[in-house]
Amino acid sequence: MRRTRMGAAAAAVAVAITLAIAGPAGATTDGNLVYYEKNPEVIDSCAADVVVIGARGSGQDPDGYATPGAGMGKEVKLAADYLRARIKTEAPTAKVRYLSVIYAAESATSGWNWVGFKSTIYGNSVKQGVTNLKSRIKTVVSKCPSSKIVLMGYSQGAQVVHQAVLELEKAGATSQTSRIKAVWLIADPKNDGKTMFQYMTSGASALTPYKTAQYVTGGLYTSAVKAPSILTSNKTISVCNPADLVCSKISGTGFSAHGKYRTSGWNSWPAKYAYAALYRAGLR
């Protein structure tokens, strides 16, 4: 069963990647959202002021990458919609583009060996996501020279974003990292509690600087590797419910809180923060 599922997932990813480089079929605008009717993942051309690249969480269905933001997963798509609404209010003429990280997003328990919470299948899924995200960033930088990039990820997708930014910084890819103007992480398994701002309370009217973030104590995959500078700058917000074991392994009480980020309380204020980062980058 595992081989069949993995084969199907690999085939779906291969098809999506083929479609993503096939070429534009004519741009459509829905409010301030720009996309292509036949393939919203096309990035051969770009008419957007902001490009949001989102990575879905473990086990989430990309719905064939058929509609704008479908491949982001529900948590990231909702966050992106909150940000897009904020952009529409503050910068009415700005256009936004959604792109998905095209990868398997295997379940966190796929191939679980119960030793140190490690899984080769999960690890390979993360690597695939990191590779695709770095490729997407490189392409957007090339094809959309004036677009500002926003990275978003939920759960495994947040880990993908975290790791991709780390690798880009290590490689000295400043032409790419300099184009990343905002990062929004949701339930990051690599959360080390030192992202510039932790958003820990649904509906809060303010953000908590990491130095006073007493409850966020590191995610399940936290390592001693120094966090990339982008993630410790005011470009980044990390959303984590202290009860969520995935992003706060000591204070977390289990996994039930991990699926409860789809409310305005967890998205409205972070959207303001992400827009502020774009404003500082010149979006008007």
Image (tube, rainbow, N blue to C red):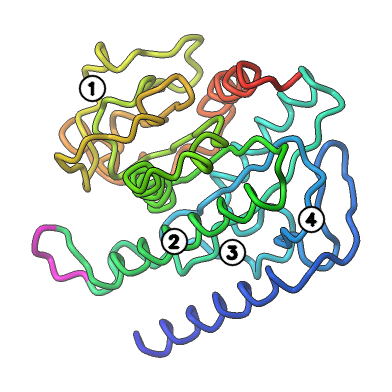
Q: Nearer the viewer, mark 2 or mark 4?
A: 4
| Sequence order check, earlier mark of 2 and 4 | 4
Q: Which residue is mark 3?
A: 62
Residue at image mark 1: 215
- Amino acid carrying label 1: it is Tyr
For the residues labelled 2 and 3, the Cα–Cα distance comes to: 13 Å
Point 66% across, 65% down: residue: 65
Q: Which residue is mark 4?
A: 45
Q: Position of residue 143 (x, y in %)?
A: 71, 52
Labels 1, 2: front one: 2
Residue 44 forms part of the magenta stretch? no
> In terms of sequence position, does the residue under pointer 1 or pointer 2 come before the other?
2
Seen from the viewer's position, the closer of residues 128 and 191 is 128
Mark 2 Cα within 10 Å, few/some/many (few <14, many 20+)? many
Within-10-Å neighbours for mark 4: few <14, some 14–19, many 20+: some
Q: Residue at position x 62%, y 45% from top?
A: 77
Q: Is residue 233 left or right of residue 39?
A: left
Mark-to-mark CA distance, 2 and 4: 22 Å
Q: CA distance from mark 4 to mark 3?
A: 23 Å
Q: Tell me, for residue 112, which label it has, or none.
A: none
Q: Is residue 140 left or right of residue 242?
A: right
- Which segment did they paint magenta? 112-116
- Quarter of the picture containing the N terminus is bottom left
| Residue 60 % position (x, y) | 50, 61
Report the mark closest to the observer, 4 or 3: 4
Q: Quadrant of residue 101?
A: bottom right
Location of mark 2 (residue): 129
Q: Which badge, 4 or 3, comes first in the chain's sequence?
A: 4
Q: Secondary structure at mark 4?
A: loop
